[in-house]
Amino acid sequence: MKRIKIGIFGYCRGSAYVDSFLQNNAEIVAVCDKRKDRLEEAKKKLGNMVTCYEEFDAFIEHSMDAVFIANYFHEHTPYIIRCFEKNIHVLCECISNSTMAEGVQLVEAAEKSKSIFMLAENYPYMIFNIEMKRLYEGGTLGKCLYAEGEYNHPSNRNDDNTRYLYDSELHWRNYLPKTYYVTHSLAPIMFATGANPVRVTAMPIFSPVPKERPTASFVGDKAAIITTLNDDKSVFRFTGHATFGGECNSYRLCCEKATVENVRGSGGKVMLHYNWWEKPKDKEAVNFYMPEYEGEDVELVKKSGHGGGDFCVAKEFLNCIRENKPHPFDVYFSTRMSSVAILGHRSLLEYGTPYDIPDFKNKADRDKYRNDTLSPFFYSDGRTPTLPCCSEQNFKPLDSQVEEFKKILKG
């Protein structure tokens, strides 16, 4: 088995993949992060096998086959393109592009490169999502007519966690619209059904954090409820990054003959419910069970983060390199999901105006968005927001909340 040399750009998220890369016969040869404390973590974990860099320009010159792009959420695209120009393979954290123009740039750079690109979207590889895909592809459910995806991840961060995740009051998490972190809710139902969104609408749930809580977030929305019409005439309804009560990851496929879903609060059990007159002979009308992983890596998968998803993503990516084959989570899949995120937010700001999702395989669709750089974020190169990040466009945290947040960062 070929030993792949891989570099990690952004060790905060990148560190979670270290064991999975090593277990799949990769060699981590370089790490790049602007924070010295994270480089020290990398050295402690990887020892002399890794070279550490503070600047990407030096890092990208290191001899390596692939790079895991795990820097700031909204700043992936320029660095992916740098890798494409050197024909270095790319595994990219979600999302792939934060503006529509970047989506165009990413696709056109990929088409000129010999690089393999894969989005590091791990939720489709959770066992219940693997099971739903297996059942759907088995053909006994009939065509999917409607599907739901819910990524609901509220948090009550302590001071140490805040300091680890944030580095200033202008950090991207403080300006993250609720439609943008969409891949954990959308990718599993796209992957299971093969349907691609072609039109999006979104509505906000506005509910700011309590006034006594330290925060510098300009997003007062708790969630975005997003609906898409898809290329096979099915409909999806899903959240972005929701933060209302009852933390869960929940998915549901409603098909012609049956419904399958992972049951909230059950620890990962699946309910497969057929119409009694259309059930297979070997099934009950209602089946409630715990799916199991299969294959030689089952114990490694069980120990991996995100329900085994991190290990599966690493394995899929490295196997694609070794076999020189594309992955379904390619630049077209990724930029379509980014378009849902970006245009979904514009719909949310207009309380439900529908937007058509472009197909960046088509030049006309690319040309429409080639110069569309609207963004809600502050960028490392000095660019400032050109789009509101919250449904209540004048919403902002109290000065007292921001000052307390800044005190936490200072320690």
Image: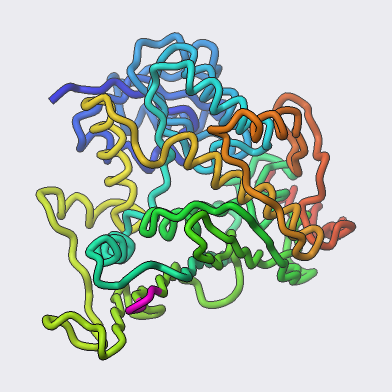
Give the camera-side residue of 217 and 354: 354
Q: Tell whether 225 sits left or right of 302.
A: right
Image spot of residue 410 (x, y percent): 69, 43
**Position above or below: 290 against 292:** below
Give the camera-side residue of 289 and 370: 370
Residue shown at 74%/57% (left/top)? 347
Image spot of residue 20 (x, y percent): 27, 40
Is residue 257 in the magenta section? yes
Give the magenta-colored segment's residue range: 255-259
Is residue 243 in the magenta section? no
Residue shown at 75%/69% (left/top)? 206
Res 216 visible: no
Residue shown at 45%/11% (left/top)? 86
Give the camera-side residue of 400 and 280: 280
**Position above or below: 223 against 218:** below
Q: Tell whether 116 sits left or right of 398.
A: left
**Position above or below: 364 against 264:** above
Residue shown at 45%/70% (left/top)? 145
Image spot of residue 394 (x, y percent): 89, 57
